[in-house]
């Protein structure tokens, strides 16, 4: 059975971002705009943890304090506070008094995963795995034209196919850089003329999410991240319908290393001709 997470957040756009991140962990979710609505839902919905948004301005501190205590009774050790200002004295005092972990909104994709994971998955050995896209093209594996030297060894293009979509992804890393740029575009497999815009794309490393982007009107997205050995992308093509993209190893030798160039081919040819003349 999939764990269910209660998301208590007033702002719709913020709730959608959190919902996507929770969904990448294989969790279902229940949405509430405030603590009163959340407590009412708890009588009907069985949930594993709660994510509570706290704004910098709390209109009724006493009511908020009572609501948090009720949540902690229902979810002992399984409440996370989401805030845009971790240094706000009132929020800091609440988090300290009840030992509640808090996550800043601008670091949701990085910090929410490990914090929530320890709460909802300590007893579970299986996570939801959805459709896995198939790699059909890797430019690092394509042969070079005869007599040509590859002049852009730091750009790699990958194409993936799944029943619902086709993904065209490019990795680029400048020489001596520790940052990698990923750009991509997704299209419907059967109806490529209909754009997949507004689709959430989650970038992950082995340690958890690195970022979340929404595709633009052309189905495009981009990320920049610290160099990783490999990454995955999770794309929600429709509610609860995810496609997983797994990259090949990104720290392997760059294209062109170990491959003959036109200079080395000419040098080998000259050596062979000299050897033939000596034998003659």
Image (cartoon, rainbow, N blue to C red):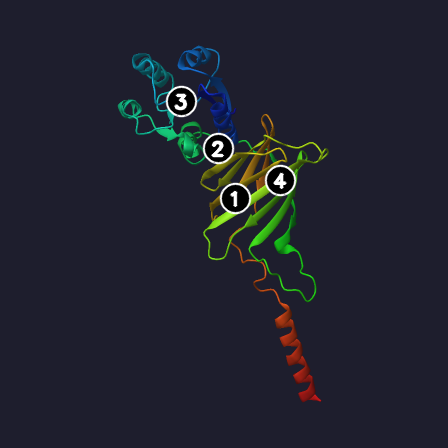
Q: CA distance from mark 4 to mark 3?
A: 32 Å
The residue positioned 47% from the left and 27% from the top of the image is: 18
Mark 2 against mark 1, which lies toward the viewer? 1
Which residue lies under the disc numbered 3? 53
Mark 1 against mark 4, which lies toward the viewer? 4
Mark 1 against mark 3, which lies toward the viewer? 3
Indicate the quadrant where residue 108 lies: top left
Which residue lies under the disc numbered 1? 231
Rendered image: mark on residue 125: 2
Above or below 114: residue 254: below
**Mark closer to the chain start, 3 or 2:** 3
Percent position of residue 50, x then y = 41, 22
Q: CA distance from mark 3 to mark 2?
A: 29 Å
Q: Secondary structure at mark 4?
A: strand
Q: Are marks 4 and 3 in contact (CB under 8 Å)?
A: no
Which residue lies under the disc numbered 4? 185
Q: CA distance from mark 2 to mark 1?
A: 22 Å
**Mark closer to the chain start, 4 or 3:** 3
């Amino acid at each position: 059975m999939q764990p269910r997470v209660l998301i208590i957040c007033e702002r719709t756009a913020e709730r959608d971002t959190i919902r996507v991140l929770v969904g990448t962990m294989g969790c279902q979710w229940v949405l509430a705009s405030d603590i009163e609505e959340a407590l009412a839902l708890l009588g009907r919905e069985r949930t594993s943890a709660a994510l509570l948004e706290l704004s910098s301005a709390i209109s009724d501190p006493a009511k908020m304090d009572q609501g948090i205590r009720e949540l902690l009774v229902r979810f002992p050790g399984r409440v996370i506070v989401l805030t845009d200002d971790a240094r706000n004295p009132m929020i800091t005092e609440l988090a300290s008094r009840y030992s509640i972990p808090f996550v800043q909104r601008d670091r949701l994709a990085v910090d929410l995963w490990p914090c929530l994971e320890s709460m909802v998955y300590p007893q579970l050995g299986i996570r939801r795995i959805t459709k896995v896209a198939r790699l059909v093209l890797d430019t690092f594996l394509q042969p070079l034209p005869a007599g040509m030297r590859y002049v852009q060894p730091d750009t790699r293009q990958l194409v993936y196919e799944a029943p619902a979509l086709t993904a065209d992804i490019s990795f680029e890393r400048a020489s001596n850089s520790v940052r990698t740029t990923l750009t991509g575009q997704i299209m419907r497999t059967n109806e490529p003329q209909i754009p997949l815009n507004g689709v959430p794309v989650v970038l992950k490393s082995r340690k958890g999410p690195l970022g979340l982007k929404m595709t633009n009107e052309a189905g495009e997205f981009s990320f920049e991240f610290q160099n990783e050995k490999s990454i995955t992308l999770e794309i929600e093509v429709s509610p609860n319908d995810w496609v997983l993209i797994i990259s090949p190893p990104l720290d392997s030798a760059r294209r062109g290393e170990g491959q003959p160039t036109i200079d080395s081919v000419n040098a080998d040819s000259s050596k062979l001709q000299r050897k033939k003349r000596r034998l003659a």
